[in-house]
Amino acid sequence: MDDRQRFREVVLPHLDDALSLARWLTGNVPDAEDVVQDACLRAYRAIATTKDINPRAWLLAIVRNAAFTWLAKNRPKTAVTTNDEALFERASLEMVDPQASPETILIGKIDAEQLHTAIAALPLPYRETLLLREIEELSYQEISKILSIPIGTVMSRLARARNLLIQRLAMAGKGKAGAA
Amino acid sequence: MNKPSAWSSREESLLLLNAYLDNELDAASVLEIERRLAADPALKLEHDRLVQLRGVFASQLKTQKASNDFRRRIEAMAEPKFPPVIRRISLPTRARGFAWREMAAAAALAAIIAAGGTYTFLRPNSQSNEIAAIVADHQRALLAATPFDVASSDRHTVKPWFDSKLALSPQVIDLSSAGFPLAGGRVEVIDGKPVPVLVYQRRAHIISVVAIPRAGQKDTTEPSLATTNDGYFVIQWRGRDFDYTVVSDLAENELDEFVNLWRHAARVN
């Protein structure tokens, strides 16, 4: 099978997934398209040498790296340093108000915009881990490989990301209920 | 999933709860977390929130669909005209191997044609007129102040220039590493239609590559056909979307080499 054929079979079926990830990492579709186009170029060049048996995870890893290159170039202020990350990992995992009942949380009434705002506000390491799980539906092992972090870190990032989201959405939900 | 050594802390319960909901726990850990959920109302509450959150994800988090336009742009990467930037690195050695073989084939073919005394062209009718016109244009270009309208050794300048002038462009191949630098491009009128001409240089010699559009034509590996006209060497072949005619006063073997390199590069592009 030649490279073009491989590219068509390995990359093209996962274009929506690639774009979704890039869209979440950059924040908008035009920038995401830039990133994915760059990622596809990289994928095309690397396709002859890759031995990866999981094309989707392989492509998403390239998209993720392309997104970071893009962010570093175009939005240097959002670039995450390793120090920031270490700080995040140390942050403790808090229970949401243990007394609150699920009904008062109201996150079931959250609309897409509120959810998007809350996800966008997550620190990048949490956000990308969450997205790989919730949008791309990758396994812990695949996420661990893409982000080059131990599985234990995948677990803790996911737990913290969801924890933060529940807290923020709970506030948004309350605000909404109060306004209504 | 390995079971963490200590199960005591609430934080670890939360980590395991997430992994449980993500279907990432082994059977023993599943039993353990379910036991803990039954015994710990606060943990059960957290469980319910996470399930709620998952429901919100499922209903509100949509995959970004690639637009048709974008999809086509990406698909175009896998089409033959896409320049594979990386592969050129390995070109010289491979190209040489190819080129020599093809050159031998071309030489053999040329010998057969010469011996038979008959010239077969790609399209017998009007073909010799076309060659005469192309050679005349080449001669005229040599007499002009410059043999090109756009002077650039950068194919990224030449290709867009053609696109803007003619709304089409042949493959612009960079052979500078093989000693055939791109000099520029011009537009000729052949058979009443404007056609793109690439201009390459070899020492003091000018090589014109005339690209006559043949929409939808596939790239071929048919041998190139060589002839002479008015003292100029002419080599023709069919490429993707274009019929190519190369004219030069360069020595015939060097022009053969040029054509073989060019065709090879066009093919791997």
Image (spheres, coloured by chain):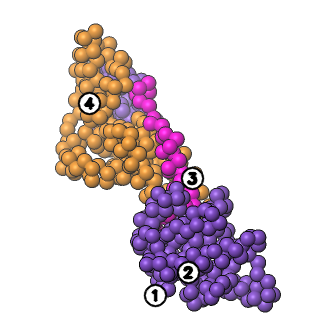
Give the residue displayed 36% in from the left and 44% down from the top.
A31
Labels 1, 2: front one:
2
Work out how far the residue at label 3 is from the one at label 2, CA to CA, in angstroms: 45 Å
Give the residue displayed 22% in from the left and 29% down from the top.
A94
* Amino acid type shown at disc 1: Arg
The tint of chain A in the picture is: orange
Examine the rendering and report whether any part of residue A1 can be seen.
Answer: yes
* Amino acid type shown at disc 4: Leu
Answer with left or right where residue B169 lies relative to residue A63.
right
Q: Which residue, given by chain and number where applicable, does mark 3 sit on?
A: A8
Displayed quadrant of residue B57: top left
Labels 4, 3: front one:
3
Residue B185, image x, y percentages: 48, 70
Labels 4 and 3 touching (C-beta < 8 A): no
- Please, what secondary structure does the residue beneath circle 1 have? loop
Dot 4: chain letter: A
The tint of chain B in the picture is: purple
Q: Does the magenta stretch include residue B137?
A: no
Residue B99, image x, y percentages: 60, 81
Q: Which residue, given by chain and number where applicable, does mark 4 sit on?
A: A164
Q: Would you call the spot at circle 2 few (<14 residues within 10 Å), some (14-19), or many (20 or more)?
A: some
Labels 2 and 4 touching (C-beta < 8 A): no
Work out how far the residue at label 4 is from the one at label 3, CA to CA, in angstroms: 39 Å
Residue B76 has which mark?
Answer: none
Q: Which residue, given by chain and number where applicable, does mark 2 sit on?
A: B139
